[in-house]
Image: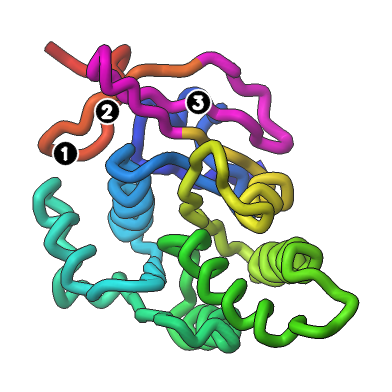
Amino acid sequence: MERVKTGVTGLDDMLSGGIPNGFVLAVAGGPGSGKSILATQFIWQGIQQNEDGLFILLSGEGNEVIAQASQFGYQLDNNPKFHFFIQGGDTENMTEQIQRHIEQFGIRRVVIDSISLFNVYQRAQRETATRGSNYSADALASKDNRMIIDEIRSYKDVTTMVLVEDYDSMPIEDKVIKFACDGVIKISVNSVLGIRSITVEKMRETNHPLTASAFEITQTGIVLRSMKSD
């Protein structure tokens, strides 16, 4: 089986060499946990392997991604292998735009940052559409999210990370994303002990550990503590 390296050496070891090619992976964690850094590292690893990557922002500006990447030595500015678009509140054509980029540039890696914000936009539209009907917004959200993941999964030889804001009262559509994806990586922060950790909660077709591994955010990106050289 072909596997796609994340760029995080210790994490790739946990995944028997990387994410299975073509999988859709949910990266779940709270604000400041390191989700976007992991996603950027994933895109940069692909560029180093001569693969085109697509970064989709649901808010903000593309130069924010480029600026963050530059802090770790990832040169994304004016890089012909790096592509991005800002989706904003119009969620109707996101998968169509992804498909166009894949066909035009031969994209092999995709990041959606974040699917949670996408769901916020979608929920507002659904609540308007379902007002006075027999269908609940939650039911439509669950159905639509499964369809979105299935459509993204159908892109041949494209491996995707979708970032999910993870918290106790997270909405049903975000929980459905975690079930629908082929794999789930959970990033946790213990603010009392000052420790960030990463856990592979699920990865189909992969024998992986279920224990959490501590990591640090270094000058070159995320490094698992057990893999960090002195």
**Residue 150 seen:** no
Q: Residue at horizontal 37%, vertical 71%?
A: 57
Q: Where is residue 41 in the image (x, y as percent from the top left)?
A: 30, 48
Q: Residue at horizontal 39%, vertical 66%?
A: 53
Q: Quadrant of residue 85?
A: bottom left
In this rendering, the label closer to the viewer, 3 or 2: 3
Q: Residue at horizontal 28%, vertical 19%?
A: 195
Circle 2 crowding by C-alpha within 10 Å: few under 14, some 14–19, many from 20: many
> Would you say 131 lies left or right of 10 here?
right
Residue labelled with disc 3:
199
Circle 3 crowding by C-alpha within 10 Å: few under 14, some 14–19, many from 20: many
Residue labelled with disc 2:
223
> Would you say 169 lies left or right of 8 here?
right
Disc 2 marks a residue whose amino acid type is: Val
Name the one closer to the observer, 159 or 58: 58
Circle 1 crowding by C-alpha within 10 Å: few under 14, some 14–19, many from 20: few
Name the one closer to the observer, 22 or 194: 194
Residue labelled with disc 1:
220
